[in-house]
Image (cartoon, coloured by chain):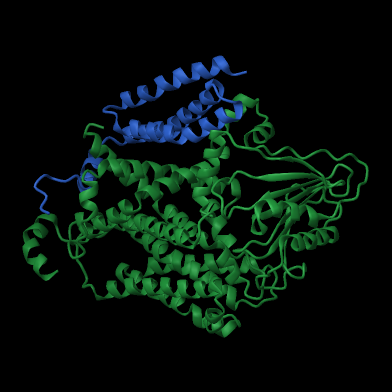
Amino acid sequence: MVAAVPQMTASTLWERARGWRWPGVAMRTIAAILGGYALGALASVVCATLLPLERAEAVMTGMLLSFAVYAGAVVWVFAARTALRAWVGLLIPMAVLAAAAWMTWP
Amino acid sequence: MKNGFRQSMAWLHTWSGLLVGWILFAVFLTGTASYFKGEISQWMRPELHASAAGPEAAAELAVNALRQIAPRSNTWSVGLPQERDPIIRVFWRSPEARRFQNAILDPVSGERVDSRQTRGGDFFYRFHFELHMQPIWGRWVVGFCAMMMLVAIISGVITHRRIFADFFTFRPGKAPQRSWLDAHNAMAVLALPYHLMITYTGLITLMLMYMPWGIDAAYNGNRQAFFAEAVGSPPPPRAAGRPGELVAIGPLVAEAARQWGEQGVARLTVHNPTDANSVVQISRGDAGRLSMNPQTIVFNGTTGERTSETGGDGAAAATRGVTYGLHLGRFAGPVMRALFFLSGLAGTGMVATGLILWAAKHRQKRAATAKPGFGQRLVDTLNVATIAGLPIAMAGFFWANRLLPLDIAARPDWEIRVFFGLWVASLLHALIRPLRRAWIEQFAFAAFLGLAIPLLNALTTQRHLGVSLPQGDWAMAGMDLGLAGMGALMGAIAWKLARRPETVPVKRKARDAAMPAAAKSA
């Protein structure tokens, strides 16, 4: 199979990686690791307190889903076109979930 | 990032995989080995023989032993012999201590085990999620790596445009990074549902530690109440302070066995055994059922009457139980277990080929005459020390089990020291030797360690292949043959590496120009 279209190989990624401003990557990494966890945790809390299920069931559901939320957040952070979008895309859902959690925290 | 979705996912895939790849290799390999935890433990305690005694007899032996060992303990816990793990484990806690102590009893005599002291298959099992660190730290490290793995899988799937077409592509003769990429893709896509399942369910097994915040929010931090409601296990009762006589255990176990089958009774816990408020909880085992959620019958300890039973699970609790069960795979019969094992090996190979691929690509990008940079050398050395070194260490663990004197103090710890010692030696060897020699020599050594296991077993025990095969003792025979098979695999890799001529990294343009010529001679 001859690659007529230049395939995105890791070696060309290297070139691009060197060209990126490292602080940007560092900021996104922190946003992904910490912000993603916070988003997953908030999602689990909101599920636990707001889902119309028995208490134990709602808590379990929140926990089961939290890792998918975390992974999705990480993908978002690195897919967003700009670092600003990456942060805003995390902070808005976090704010919404945090507000919902705070209003229902017993 | 600015480069488009798939390119940014390719970048994410490379880095989320590379940074924790070596830990993931160790987690995958020890986890895959743990599918045969019971067989490994049996092989490592060759003096013990499986007993045909039923659970009632074993329970009586265990409780009598605990009366001798820990009469004042407020909790006795017993693991009854199971088909794949035919020993009695007893646990107790002295009133002052917080941690449990344990002992292993012979299932026939009830005596403390008269077999060599060893951690057995439990060493690899716990290493898989604790990395032999302090349990809390180890579980957080593995959890972090598991999250990285999940991200790597998702980004890998997004990146892999022609996922189905490429699965049927394997070009072993091409330039190194093309072949490694094909191998990486094949192993990843071949068992992709498994890899995704095993990673996500792995996170679920420890989710109570990783994401407890919902419990705190909904139960005001009362985690006991959550457990009681979630899986229906009542909290243990307080001691009344009055002495009481514990009823005979055998009939209670027999009642449980009538409900779950003889093989189904797995665990027995006695709370406040010498008190008037004693309680006996009998739990079902994992074999033959998919969910890990406990099924427990609770009896009053002084009267022997049944007081409660864990009931049906809600949907979320059942989901958790089943996904946990999928990860452990204890429900699996022999064929299913073999498939799980092969899928685990594919996952291990996926991680290994990914690491090697990165190094190969990076080497190819460098000018032919440039010295390898720090990053290249770091990755190359860690690759050898992990991908070849860990199998050596694991094989060495089995050798230590057979060769260490039976009566030295802390014998299990010495077996583990041999494991880590060999692993460190592999790292040192990788630092000293030229890269290609290091790979070949270490794979060759791993091959020797594996292939010689049946011989070692014959020289050191009475349960070698000449005895175990005619008897149909598949735990022992399977271990001998399986380890020899793994050794043969290592040997085949070493052989193939030794035959291939030295490849010198060539600049890309020159290689592309030479491609037609190289393709003919490949």
Above or below — where is B440 with respect to B227? below
Give the camera-side residue of B406 and B187.
Answer: B187
Give residue B362's quadrant in the image.
bottom left
Q: Is residue B471 left or right of residue B78?
A: left
| Residue B260 percent coordinates (x, y) | 66, 52
Res. B374 visible in picture: no
Percent coordinates x, y for residue B423 in the rendering: 48, 65
Residue B152: x and y in percent read 35, 44
The residue lying at 86 percent from left, 55 percent from top is: B71
Q: Is residue B469 visible?
A: yes
Residue B365 vs residue B115: left or right? left
Q: The blue chain is which one?
A: A
Query: Does residue A21 appear left or right of residue A90 in this picture?
Result: left
Of the chain colours in the picture, the one used for chain B is green
Q: Quadrant of residue A85?
A: top left
Viewer-proximal residue among B243 and B60: B60
